[in-house]
């Protein structure tokens, strides 16, 4: 299983391995970011010898907080690299075979249309879109629809929600559950929870946009 393999790999090579895998995830590496983060949380718990409840362990085990910081760095540097590659090289980047596979012509048009409609909120949602995250970040750089500061703040805000969720889930799971299969069960529940929240947020934004449009049509403002 992927989670078992990542835990073994991270146990051997530590924080640098977690950082490296997350960095490559930003480049489109076909490894789920959430599973990677959970594995990081698991090994930070394994490295902690403190006894007591989960909350007591959080107070005494600095490893999990270091893992959170390392993971945030890997995620944001990877995302920023994709943004800057698009920003610096523009559409020329799409002639490179690797990026042409990530950003197809259809995806390029689709991302542009979504940017026109939702602006930088589309970047926020991209953090929760496995498989589409890299193309969206590349195109956001190519089109220059948002500045890097806005990109970083938006992506960072989304990462502050997603990264600790999975890191601390892995930490909790290793200490409270009996086996990896149980942790994977909670990963699926967490994924469903995230998708539900994002779905509600998207529907809410669409409703707000629709109401504003109707008000503007009636009032002219």
Image (spheres, grey):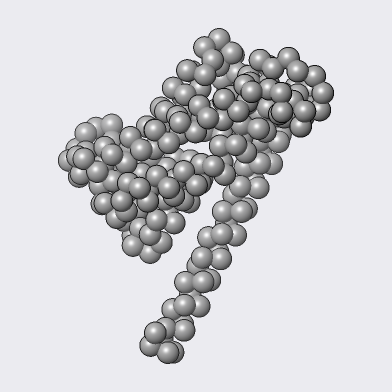
Determine the residue positioned at 71% across, 28% down: 59
The spot of residue 11 in percent (x, y) is: 59, 13
In the figure, 48 relative to 133: above or below? above
Of residue 74 and residue 180, the one placed in the foreground of this image is 74
Of residue 154 and residue 50, the one placed in the foreground of this image is 50
Which residue in the rendered view is the most extreme toward the top?
12
Determine the residue positioned at 41% across, 61% down: 118
Q: Quadrant of residue 169?
A: top right
**In the displayed structure image, the side of residue 137 where residue 161 appears, left or right:** right
The spot of residue 79 in percent (x, y) is: 39, 37
Q: Quadrant of residue 87?
A: top left
The spot of residue 219 in percent (x, y) is: 42, 89
Determine the residue positioned at 82% across, 23% down: 52
In the figure, 87 relative to 78: above or below? below
Determine the residue positioned at 50% across, 47% down: 157
Asked if residue 39 can be seen in this view, the reply is no
């Amino acid at each position: 299983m992927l989670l078992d393999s990542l835990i073994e790999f991270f146990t051997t090579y530590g924080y640098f391995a977690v950082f490296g895998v997350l960095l490559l995830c930003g480049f489109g590496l076909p490894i789920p970011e959430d599973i990677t983060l959970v594995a990081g949380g698991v090994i930070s718990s394994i490295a902690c010898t403190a006894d007591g409840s989960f909350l007591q362990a959080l107070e005494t085990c600095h490893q999990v907080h270091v893992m959170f910081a390392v993971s945030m760095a890997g995620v944001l540097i990877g995302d920023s690299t994709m943004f800057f590659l698009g920003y610096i090289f523009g559409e020329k980047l799409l002639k490179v075979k690797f990026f042409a596979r990530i950003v197809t012509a259809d995806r390029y048009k689709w991302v542009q249309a979504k940017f026109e409609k939702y602006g930088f909120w589309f970047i926020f949602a991209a953090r929760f879109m496995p498989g589409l995250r890299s193309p969206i970040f590349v195109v956001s750089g190519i089109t220059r629809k948002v500045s890097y500061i806005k990109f970083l703040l938006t992506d960072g805000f989304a990462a502050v929600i997603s990264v600790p969720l999975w890191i601390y889930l892995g930490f909790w799971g290793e200490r409270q559950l009996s086996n990896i299969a149980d942790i994977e069960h909670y990963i699926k529940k967490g994924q469903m929870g995230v998708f539900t929240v994002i779905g509600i947020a998207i529907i809410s934004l669409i409703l707000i946009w629709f109401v504003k449009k109707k008000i503007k049509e009636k009032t002219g403002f």
